[in-house]
Amino acid sequence: MGLIMKIAESMSRLGTETAFEVLARARALEGEGRSIIHLEIGEPDFDTPANIRDAAKKALDDGHTHYGPSAGIPALREAIATEIGRSRGIEVSPAQVVVVPGGKPIIFFSLLACVNPGEEVIYPNPGFPIYESVINWIGAKAVPLPMREANSFGIDVSELETLISPRTSFLILNSPANPTGAVATGEQLARIAELAIEHDFIVLADEIYSRIIYGGEHLSLLTFPGMAERLILLDGFSKIYAMTGWRLGYGVMPEKLAFWVGRLMTNSNSCTASFTQIAGIEALTGPQDEVRAMVAEFERRRDFIVSGLNKIDGFSCLQPEGAFYVFPNITALGRTSKELEIYFLEECGVAMLTGTSFGALGEGYIRLSYANSVENITEALHRIKDGVARL
């Protein structure tokens, strides 16, 4: 008799990030000789800056290929603390910093360390799908906070207040937001800080797109009175330094929590690769010219794709304030978001994501990443327009 592999019941509650599934299908079509334009994956199309790559090569040659401290090498934790102090205007100790392989571990570890089964976690919907997935997996109750187009996909603080209960222990905030590109206002953040203190809950502020913002400055909830002792800041190197494959992120949090998140690192990953951390120091302390140029190019692409989509019958697209995504309303086309995701990929050669990849409230929307060249975006718009005409 063969061994029957039993899977834990909790695994049925674990979701996924469908961007990788659509990417795999798109790659398969390319393997068949099809031309596919990739607007599905949230990844800058730029190369990692040369100075960062050079720092990693040198680190390898210098022998930084061994285990390091679970919470990160001291030099990078110091550089991150300095950068957070500079960019957020608040003093941060290196002991508050935990370096992890990518941004997702901070989501996992924060929820594991702070939320008990049965407690309630409020999260944005539509929002990054891993939030809801991990909440459900740990046995907590996921409470969606609607991000509505009528409110420019911003946070309705009055609605948030109605969702808070005696069981609320945690709130997830994402600004600039994936998938909508919405940016929280100072007024919204101030009221969220008041609610967190009044109702005694923890906040995870996912600020991975903090430097990809147009026409303004990033505001961090960390800087508001009373939040330093109850907030976890998530940031990293993937988006702004085009380092998605390097897997390098970090969290900034109270020292007491940093100890336990470091312990979770010990139990899961042991440590983040040392040579990538050396590259991270160069990223933070080296020249930033390429970063500024990349953001300027993203803004140019944003304006181009928003204008183009709004000229296509059945599409209605708000202009995002940050990140590198658009989230157009496609309800006028009379098809579900999933049907259109499949149609535009299979019939038009344009890979994009159904809005429901980001939660049930994403129905009626499609997410497109404009982390691609204007030339490719131009061709994608032509294909979408032709495809709409054939629906």
Image: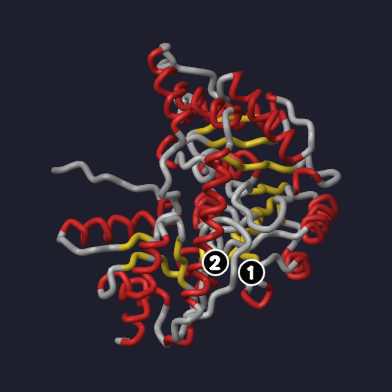
Q: Amino acid at mark 2?
A: Asp
Q: Residue at x 42, y 15 (%)?
A: 66
Q: Residue at x 78, y 31 (%)?
A: 91
Taking depth in this image into account, of 110 and 81 the one nearest to the observer is 81
- Kindly indicate the quadrant of the structure image that contains residue 188: bottom right
Name the residue located 51 percent from the left edge and 25 percent from the top edge: 277
Q: Quadrant of the N terminus?
A: top left
Using the image, tell me which numbered label, if any, was put on residue 303: 2
User: Which of the 4 image quarters holds residue 286?
Assistant: top right
Q: Earlier in the sequence, mark 1 or mark 2?
A: 1
Q: Residue at x 56, y 56 (%)?
A: 323
Q: Label 1 belongs to which residue?
A: 153
As drawn, 66 above or below 387? above
Image coordinates for residue 265, horizontal then vertical, percent: 52, 29
Q: Is residue 310 left or right of residue 90?
A: left
Q: Residues within 10 Å of mark 1 (few under 14, many from 20)?
A: many
